Image (tube, rainbow, N blue to C red):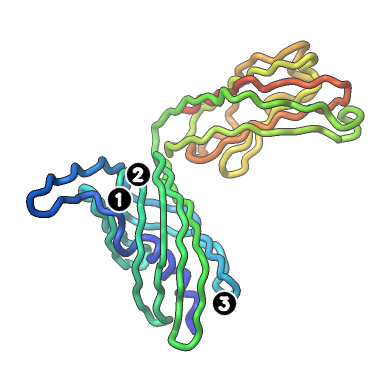
Amino acid sequence: MGRISLQLTLLCAVFIGSAIGCNRSGGRGSVAAVAPPCVDASGVWEGEVMTIDSGNCPDHNGTRLVTIFVLQVGCDLTVTDAQGNSFTGTIDGDALAWSGNFSDSTGTTTVDTATATIIGDSLAGTTSYIWTDGIEVCSGTTSFNLVRPCTAPGAHFECNPSPLPIPDASSGCIINGHAACDGSTIFVPHSFTISNLSVQIDITHPFGGDLSATLISPTGTVEFLIVQGVQSTPPDIHTTLVTSNFAGECSVGVWTLQVCDWCSDGEVGILTQWCIDMR
């Protein structure tokens, strides 16, 4: 029934239809409302769109990579997908909301509700849909996480000052592999290619030698910054570490610092703060 093209249809549905408008005016004798500012959504966006069907059409399920181009004039948008299909929408502040329907060779798709938020160079949201070819009816949701392609140069510095408890290992030391781990995250909203990256780590712990620290990028690259029993000395850890392991990666997304305690000796600690500096 040509359901593969539904994947492309749903991408279009993500961006079509009427949205919460930015240009609003009152009736006769009323005062026109001031349009709220609109963030810049223009340019190329790429990333993943995932479809989850409610059960009627499980073959609709799947994740795919997509690329779209957004032309923005004021708060009005024209969105063009990789197949050359163009759609219109609006943006209110940093939020998009829309609904609508359209038809193609596979059938008719109706988008009931959809919301999305732009944070820097990241665009994420969800939508619900109903699709029918006149005989079969399917419904489900799509979620999308898109980013602007990396540009160079760029820079970003940010800290996570929220304390993170570091529990004691469950039993033994490193030889038993029963480490107690927890993670703290920093979201980087800007998209650029990384050349240099450094991480500042501040930990309070009776014996820093029990600990390891690992940095994980949004794409899953792992760098061991502190190795248990090697780089740390008692009682605390206050250090800035430079790594080239992320050179060439894109900055945008969630970065995770994972701290592990590898020895069960009754000692616990706190990750008091960590900072990431990328250029």
Q: Quadrant of residue 274?
A: top right
- In depth, the one of 246 and 259 nearer the eye is 259
Q: Relative to 151, say whether 98 is above or below.
A: below
Q: Going by the image, does 131 lie left or right of 89? A: right
- In depth, the one of 191 and 119 nearer the eye is 119
Report crowding for label 2: few under 14, some 14 to 19, many 20 or more residues within 10 A (C-alpha): some
Q: Is mark 2 in CB contact (under 8 Å) with mark 1?
A: yes
Q: Which residue is mark 2?
A: 94
Report crowding for label 1: few under 14, some 14 to 19, many 20 or more residues within 10 A (C-alpha): many
Please tell me which of labels 2 and 3 falls first in the chain: 3
Real-space Cα separation, disc 2 to disc 3, in angstroms: 33 Å
Q: Quadrant of residue 180?
A: top right
The answer to whether residue 198 of the structure is visible from this angle is no
Q: Which mark is residue 13?
A: none
Real-space Cα separation, disc 1 to disc 3, in angstroms: 32 Å
Q: Going by the image, does 181 lie left or right of 40? A: right
- What percent of the width, then of the height, locates residue 44? 35, 51
Q: Which residue is mark 3?
A: 57
Residue at 45%, 81% (x, y): give it.
132
Residue at 49%, 33% (x, y): give it.
194
Residue at 78%, 11% (x, y): give it.
234
Q: Relative to 146, say whether 218 is above or below.
A: above
